[in-house]
Amino acid sequence: MTTTGTEVRGSPMTIQQVSRLSGLSEPTLRYYEKIGLIPAVDRDRDSGHRRYHPTVVETIKALGCLRSTGMSVQDMRAYLRHLDEGAQGAAPLRDLFRRNAERLEREMELMAVRLRYLRLKAEMWDARERADADTERRAIDEITGVIDAL
């Protein structure tokens, strides 16, 4: 049996352990259970606290990864549905991941523009502080172009 931090592989895990492991908050884990994205979680007989079976934890880790990319709950449902279809599920899963990769790429491009905007604003204020009118004017001109790109 291997131990990673406080969780033991093969043993049921608490919601707190699963939250730390998956990056999903405890309320998100409860919500995913409520909407059926993950199966109903076993409860400890004495305390009533959730105890996550290792196979469910593996699914939750995958969902945490997908969620961190901004994937929608609807697409996560489709992912889970097509997983067990073997070769028949390959094409829908390929399309789902391609579509989400393209969405994420567009978001990253937009984030790059926003990052450029912030750096130019910092440059502009730095130039103003140094009373460097030429650099400030160039930064303002570039900022205008960046704003148009947004």
Image: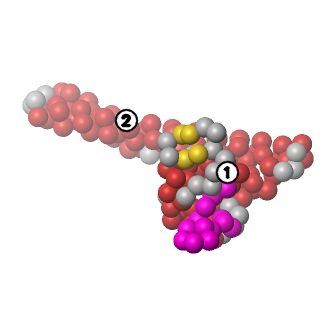
Image spot of residue 95 (x, y percent): 76, 45
Q: Which residue is farthest right?
A: 88
Q: Which residue is mark 2?
A: 116
Q: Is residue 47 magenta?
A: yes
- Residue 54 shows which numbered tag? 1
Q: Nearer the viewer, mark 2 or mark 1?
A: 1
Residue stretch in magenta? 40-53
What secondary structure is found at the residue carrying circle 2? helix
Q: Quadrant of the C terminus?
A: top left
Residue 121 visible somewhere in the drawing = yes
Query: Of the residues shown, which amino acid type is indicated by label 1?
Result: Pro
Q: Chief secondary structure of the magenta span?
A: loop
Query: In this rendering, would 98 be left or right of 44?
Result: right
Image spot of residue 33 (x, y percent): 64, 66
Density class for disc 2 (Cα within 10 Å; few <14, some 14-19, many ≥20) is some
**Quadrant of residue 35 in the image?**
bottom right
